[in-house]
């Protein structure tokens, strides 16, 4: 398994504000976070860990504004995005089930 070098200080993190850089640096940790988020929440069959992680990336990369002064804030924001995506997917699934019963 490849070793990941995390930013050591807030200054280093400030230099890594770009979501692309943060995602590539923290990919393994984000993958574990996505796995935990799916385990904690109801998991639609069509949502895999990798899909959740990639949808999180797309969502976060589309935002102009969030600046992450440290790794903890970046990971916290990523967790909130993942929870939102899981909720959205669950609501879509519930809607589909209800429409089939009507």
Image (tube, rainbow, N blue to C red):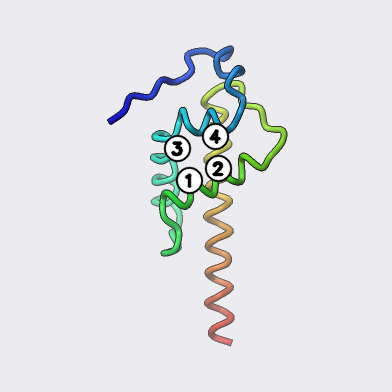
Task: Give the residue number, with chain letter if any, for mark 2.
Answer: 57
Residue at 61% in and 25% down? 17
- Residue 87 is situated, as x and y percent measured from the top left of the image, at 56, 57
Residue sitting at x 39%, y 35%:
28
What numbered label is drawn on residue 30?
Answer: 3
Q: Earlier in the sequence, mark 1 or mark 4?
A: 1
Q: Nearer the viewer, residue 92 or 28?
A: 28
Residue closest to the eye, 67 or 58: 58
Q: Secondary structure at mark 4?
A: helix
Question: Considering only order in the chain, which callout, 3 or 4, is on the residue closer to the N terminus?
Answer: 3
- Label 1, label 3: how many angstroms apart (C-alpha)? 7 Å
How much space separates mark 1 and mark 4, taking CA atoms? Answer: 14 Å
Camera-nearest residue between 59 and 38: 59
Q: Which mark is residue 3?
A: none
The single residue placed furthest to the right in the displayed view is 65
54 sits to left or right of 62: left
Instruction: Give the mark nearer the N terminus: 1 vs 3.
Output: 3
Q: What residue is disc 4 on?
A: 76
């Amino acid at each position: 398994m490849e070793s990941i070098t995390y930013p050591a200080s807030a200054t280093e993190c400030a230099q890594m504000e770009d979501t692309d850089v943060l995602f590539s640096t923290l990919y393994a940790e984000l993958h574990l976070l996505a796995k935990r988020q799916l385990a904690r929440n109801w998991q639609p069959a069509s949502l895999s860990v990798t899909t959740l992680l990639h949808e999180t990336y797309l969502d976060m990369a589309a935002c102009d504004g969030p600046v992450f002064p440290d790794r903890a804030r970046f990971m916290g924001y990523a967790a909130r995005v993942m929870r939102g995506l899981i909720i959205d997917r669950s609501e879509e699934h519930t809607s589909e089930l209800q429409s089939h019963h009507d």
